[in-house]
Amino acid sequence: MTMQNLELNTTSTVAPKQIPTSAEIQAWIVSYLADLLEVDSEEIEVTIPFDRYGLDSSAAVGLTGDLEDWLGCELDPTLLYDYPTVEALVLHLNSELKAKS
């Protein structure tokens, strides 16, 4: 049996994860809410407070946790209380993500 020496490419050019745009973040949140509430995405208004959609604290924490996983960064579970609309949350996240990059 012949053994070959394999060289590992240590200069791999793996691109860093791209920061999502505001539009991508908003689309993700709107889609998440639409799925959670079992409505069409078009029915989610980005300027209406989350509590008007009937989100309780466990739903807010769940959304924050899933958003944290999607973004790949740690988020405060109370974020939806500090930024009570999709629009406000997206602006905040976009600003924070740009500052960290």
Image (cartoon, rainbow, N blue to C red):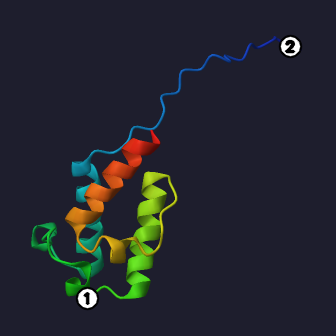
Point 39% across, 70% down: residue? 79
* Side of 73 where 34 appears, left or right: left
Mark in the foreground, 2 or 1? 1
* Side of 45 where 98 appears, left or right: right
Point 14% across, 70% down: residue? 47
Q: Secondary structure at mark 2?
A: loop
Name the kind of residue labelled 2 in the image.
Met
What residue did someone put label 1 on? Answer: 54
Crowdedness near tag 2: few (<14), some (14–19) or many (≥20) residues, C-alpha within 10 Å: few
- The numbered mark, 2 or 1, whose residue comes first in the sequence reads 2
* Cα distance in 3D space between marks 2 and 1: 64 Å
Name the kind of residue labelled 1 in the image.
Gly
Q: Secondary structure at mark 1?
A: loop
Q: Nearer the viewer, residue 23 or 14?
A: 23
Q: Position of residue 41 (x, y in %)?
A: 16, 67
What residue did someone put label 2 on? Answer: 3
Query: Quick check: can you spot residue 20?
Result: yes
